Amino acid sequence: MKKLLKIVETIRPTFDEGGKLGLFKPVFEALENFLFSPSTTTLTAPHVRDPLDVKRVMSMVIISLVPSILAAVYFFGLRFFVMVIVTYAAGLSVEAIFAIVRKESINEGFFVTGFLFPLIMPPNVPLWMVALGVMFGVFIGKELFGGSGRNVFNPALVGRCFLGLAYPAKMSASWLSAGSGMTGRIFEYASASSVDAVSSATPLALAKQGEFVSLSHMFLGSVSGSAGETSAIAIIIGGVFLLFTRVANWRTVASTLGAFIVLTAALFAGGAVNYGRLGMLDAVLWHLFAGGLLFGAFFMATDPVTSPTTNAGKWLYGIVIGSVTVLIRNFTGYVEGVTFAILLGNIVAPILDEIVFAVRLRRLRSEG
Amino acid sequence: MKNSRIHTFSTPIEGSLATLTGKYQGLILVGMSRAVSCQRCLSIYFNHNAKDFWDFGSRMKFKGGYNILLKGRPDIQVKVMPEPDELYLPLRSRRFVFSEISVKDGDRVNSGDILAKDPDNHHVPLLAPRAGVVRLKKDKDQIVLEDIAQLEEHADIDEEELSHIEHEMGAAGIKRYRLLTLGAWQFFYDAYTGVLPDPLGTPQAIIISTMNLEPYLARGDAQLQKRLLNFTRGLEQLQSLLEYQPIYLVLPKIESEFADLVRNHIRGYAWVKVMSIPLTYPYDHFGIIARKLGLGHDKGPVWGVRTEGVLATDRALTWTKPCTVRIISIAGTKINSPCHIKVMPGYPIKKIKEQFVFEPAPRLINGGILTGEIIGEETLGLDTECKGITVLPELRDREFLGFARPGWGRSCFAGCYLSALRKKFFERFNTGVRGEGRPCISCNFCEDICPAGITPHLIHKYLYRDLVEEAEQAGTGLCVECGLCSYVCPSKIDLRQQLIDAKKLIEKEKEEIRKEQLRQEEVAKKAAEEKNE
């Protein structure tokens, strides 16, 4: 490794300001600091620092996504990897261009978006749409606001929302029936042209027609849906890991799911909704595992940048997301509402924080 | 309800009477009558039930705080350093600038003589720790003492001024004057601001802490060893400075022989209110304790004194001797047997280095690892306020794929490394920032860890947008500068420095507003006078 470090050190001057490739300094820096931990030292007190950095935080999210990624490959085939590669290529180029223009270093935030985005796409969506969606999401959802850490909306959701509104027909034609058996679709490259690919409606769409997929299928994920959203068990495994590392805040997850469960149960008990043959418990669990709710609650709503910063704010934020999801699913023309609910949550997040801070400041002042 | 309260009040007093020893009997009775006569004390007594009557800490709810698991903490052993040949007394320390030099080059001074004073800090003196010859030319920032000799200590008290003060203020004034001129006053802190309090002022309470929870600072138990009697006598002396104001003694909430010994020693002192607090940094900070006790900033100053201050008070008031020798810690990651050393201000740092440090070019820090300041090459001797020397190796190697390592040996505030599965362990730290600077990702760790209950990342965002007023309203002034927010930040933002800068800026703006108001008032006055004429 010392040799590699030497090579890095010898070519560094070419990327310094005034060097031949000075323009690409952010790209070089990102690569260098990816390979070798940075050499900066503390200048003032405190003289030591916690080992955690943003790279590690983002790595933790990616690790927690592994079960969902594996599930996506098992149920929907190798094409998923191609979607990831396309996402990375398209999104990173937008990110790099902005870093070069701004003369800032490339931020790690995108590495998570690069996995999140294909996971919330229909598995058979055309690749050009994947590229377009992620570029839109990164450009409009993040860079225009000043880059990672300053964005108001979750970039992956912005991209997904854009595609859903701009190409609704293409999106709904891109669902794929999940693979089954020992190998699932692991050895298949399912695409629109392949024979095996069967466009099939998602459980939530079927539910609107009164047809309910069995609960166990929903739990395992062998149903139609967005690549990473179908398998509840994989999401829960990864999500709980994320909660243990404290990267995701448990309050957001608890309040989102709690509000969802309570409101669904209340509507069911009040007779406002009717889920056919399902009983109360089955109905609540079914809706919990359906669509993107779990994925959204564990991986999208918990994005620290776009959620409220205060703990009290997080509780309120989760309640907004959970209940708006229920309302959209049951009382509008859309079959799924998690994307809109979280984006709406992103909008109210700063307001929730303002309210919490106002209350807290009053208390601080009275304390002296 | 009322009856039960009175009942709880009487029980512990009876209990304490049973444990009376002959020696302290009179004192306790005096203390009791004082406590009973004071309305405020009564209300404090009534608010506590019988079980934790003696303990004010058990009702306190602390927030945040964190103990960094570092290797190389000092053990209880105290080593006496050999007598030096020369002393280099820096004229600057954290709080003081001794600009008023009262000796000339070539003067022969006794130990205890005043070498210089700080005119901005109530003329707190810089004392000569040993007899010797003064050299001023060598360096402007320090006084060098040559030909060091350990002679009888001398109390440098101006008799004329003393009689003047006695005339003005009586016996209490003399005591305070002695504390100041004998070097004991520099161990007193204003609990909220950390500055030197006015020696002639009256505090609303004194908080005495036996702890130094910041990593690597001198431990209270090491300083108290074999000096328990001096400590209790110092408490009595402190009490004699006050009228009825309470004294809070902060002890660690641990079960150890030594802690029990201390508790037993002060059991008879009814006027000492004991608080046991958890051993979590920085719960021992005077500002935090004062806030938790409800001693409002606006109700008058609160004095904070540590173990050393109590011992110095005893020395100055009981023996009328100057306080120059102190026990500090020498600790850190690359140290031969971290421990405590008995030294005097001005002790050559080179000598300490020779004996303890084996790392070729480490970082030397004056103070603890979270708030200390780097000791530069130009500083040759210990300053008067040094509480400990911390030695930290500089970062050298760059790890290949460092962020992706499992991290079995890295202790982390969040559980993002494999070490989260491990039992408590201690890590060897170095000066590495361990990451790249990034915009805040609002992870909220700084708020979770903040002991003062403020939101550092929010203030950071306000300051980023130049919203100073909002930053002030968000509680910047409550920051105790413990450094935990900077420590924990994954985006590696130096929040502590930003908060300190913001506090200064706010203070400055307030000062300007005050001046402006005064000026306007004067203008209005003049206008009114002119009108009258």
Image: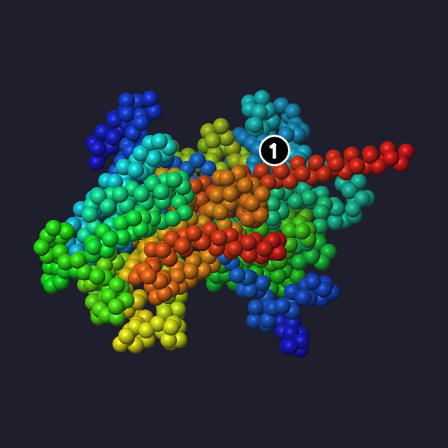
Residue A11 falls left or right of residue B334: left
Coloring basis for residues: rainbow
* Side (left or right) of B310 relative to B159: left
Q: Position of residue B71 (x, y in %)?
A: 38, 48
- Residue A344 placement (x, y as % from top left): 40, 54
Which residue is denoted by mark 1 in the rendering?
A: B97
Q: Residue at x 29, y 29 (%)?
A: A24
Of residues A20 and B53, which is closer to you in this image? A20
Q: Is residue B439 left or right of residue B383?
A: left
Say which quarter of the image contains residue B107. Answer: top right
Marked residue chain, label 1: B
- Check disc 1 and report its element: helix, strand or loop: loop
The local crowd at label 1, few if under 14, some if 14 to 19, many if 20 or more residues have their Cα within 10 Å, is some
Q: Residue furthest right?
A: B533
Left or right, residue A197 beside residue A116: left
Answer whether residue B195 is visible to the viewer in this image: yes
- Nearest the viewer among B426 and B156 is B426
Considering only vertical position in the picture, is A271 above or below B279? below
Q: Quadrant of residue B90?
A: top right
A47 is higher (above) or lower (below) than B222: above
Closer-to-camera residue (A310/A232): A232
Residue A233 place in picture, x, y as percent: 24, 63
Q: Amino acid at mark 1?
A: Val
Q: Where's residue B97, x and y in %?
A: 61, 33
Residue drawn 28% across and 44% down?
A134
Q: How many marks?
A: 1
At horizontal 9% and vertical 55% (from top left) the residue drawn is A195
Q: Residue at x 59, y 71 (%)?
A: B49
* Quarter in which the N terminus of chain A is drawn: top left
Is residue B340 visible in the rendered structure shown here? no
Q: In this view of the protein, which residue sits in the foreground, A52 or B123? A: A52
